[in-house]
Amino acid sequence: MKKRSFIDSILSYLSGMAIEVLAALFLSALAFLIIATIVSWQT
Amino acid sequence: MIQRPRILDYKNIAFYSGKIIFGVGLLMILPLVTALIFAEWNPALDFMIGIFSCFTLGLSMQLFFKTDHDLSWLQGMVVASFSWLLAMLLGAIPHYLSGHFASFLDACFDLMSGYTTTGLFLLQDLDHISHALNMWRHLLTYAGGQGIIVIALTFLVGGSGGVVKIYVGEGKDEKLLPNVIQTARAIWLISLSYLVAGSLVLWVIALFEGMPPVRGLLHSVWIFMGAWSTGGFAPQSLNTSYYHSLFFEMASIIIFIIGSFNFALHWAVWTKNRKEIYRNIEIISFTITLSIALAITTVGLIRMGVYPEAVAMFRKAFYQISSAHTTTGFMTIQARAFVRQWGEMGMIGVTMAMAIGASACSTAGGFKGLRMGVIFKALVKEIRGILAPESAVIVEKMHHIKNVVLDDGHIRSAMLIVLSYIMIYTVTTLVGVYYRYPFVESLFDAVSVGSNSGLSCGVTSPAMPALMKVVYILAMWMGRLEFMAIFGLVGFMYASVKGK
């Protein structure tokens, strides 16, 4: 029982990390969109 | 009437500061081991002297001022601010002995820059320093990011109730778990998990780019430490542009963005509350201010005609802006390129990003997203108040881990800290202008030190006047500890002299 809860926490931590990586990727994608929009508008 | 501190006050402060100094000595063991592994005998001796100094002073302070009294709030604040200064002086010993610094002041500058996760340096000939010294530089920025007091709490201090006061004094006032020691350990769990995962990813990229395995591993760990702690130290003088790798740059961007998140947010997302990632006021505030700073800089760069197409612009502008906004300080351009290529509009966009900074209770500096969110909500509340009927009660809410009703206490506290940051930025800029640096350049580096960012447009150098170095050290220290602990130390010193 104890072992299972340990594995559960590890899985929970790993999925938390994955969500945070996705959030950082989302911010980068948003940044690229902003840059591409301004570049195409200014040139 | 101001009360003069009692002997017990001094004893308590000295005892707990002794523990933290001992902790700094323990940290130096890792660079010593690095020196022994790579047969770097002179640096090994430097670190032995450093460890001996820390242990002697730390243990003497604990022995002579032994006490079992709990800390008061004022004592906690004084320990937090005073121990950072002591840690700087002692940690600078191996730096100075390495022979890479023009003076002990320069070594102290690099130490404070490391602990506060700023990332500016006065070290000379960075490309030829020992592995041990590089390990120490990056380790102290990694440890400083989590907080040297958090380290002491995790490993050296028992579970007394008073330690929460030095924890708060270090500028981390959120409790991830009900107990402060458990909170400190949760912070380390998050940081160490990312250290393993992030370093591995960077190592794979380094191997893919053709670096030798051992060197690649060292660089990956160091770059991770610099990125995660939003520190900005790198093992080469060209900073991250040394690697010429888009993958390396992308991985470091992801690491420092995640590193700039609030530890309470990390813990919420890791444990139960997945939706927190897009509901949290700091993430919303960060996304908005990042977009605005990026738009200003992009327009400025297009007007200067530096990077004509979107991919090149993304690689250079977004790297610098995200590095500035997370207060990391990694650079893929030369320092003087800000002045010669980016122009004033680009520099102002970066300065704005640095001034705002990232999340509270993270490794980042600046005003912090939480305070920007509170101030914005306060503005909305005021406008709603003007538009609503006189008898209406205006309630404004924000979401940070839980829903919070905005009250005057939140607004006052946020405004006071932001005002203190503005004062630091102003005074530091004025000192630069006094020494005849151009205004925008002086502002750029002043905001960089005050917000613990570490980007430089060339003002920070070993040749700058000694007074400027001292002011920059103080600005980094105050910015990192978020003023309250500094006010505590100044008040304590005043009471020691003028109290009755």
Image: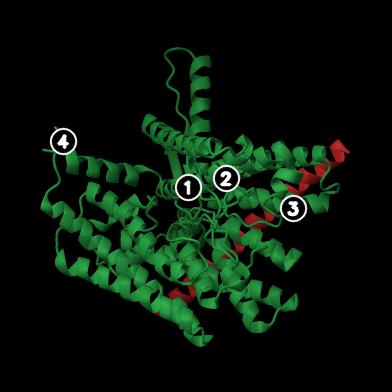
Chain colours: A red, B green
Q: Which residue is mark 3?
A: B316
Q: Counting residues from the N terminus, which is met first, the one under dot 4 or under dot 3? A: 4
Q: Toward which corner of the image does residue B50 lie, by quadrant?
A: bottom left
Tell me the kind of residue under disc 3.
Lys
B51 or B182: which is nearer to us? B51
Discs 2, 4 touching: Cβ within 8 Å: no
Discs 1, 2 touching: Cβ within 8 Å: yes
Tell me the kind of residue under disc 2.
Asp
Q: Position of residue A42 (x, y in %)?
A: 85, 36
The Cα–Cα distance between marks 1 and 2, rounded to whole angstroms, is 9 Å
What is the secondary structure assignment of the residue under circle 4? loop
Q: Which residue is mark 4?
A: B2
Q: Which residue is mark 1?
A: B472
Q: Is residue B195 above or below residue B258?
A: below
Q: Position of residue B379 (x, y in %)?
A: 51, 26
Tell me the kind of residue under disc 1.
Tyr
Q: Counting residues from the N terminus, which is met first, the one under dot 4 or under dot 1? A: 4
Discs 2, 3 touching: Cβ within 8 Å: no
Q: Counting residues from the N terminus, which is met first, the one under dot 2 or under dot 3? A: 3
The Cα–Cα distance between marks 2 and 3, rounded to whole angstroms, is 19 Å
> Which residue is painted at 49% across and 82% down in the image?
B35
Q: Which residue is mark 2?
A: B445
Position of the C terminus of chain B by quadrant: top left
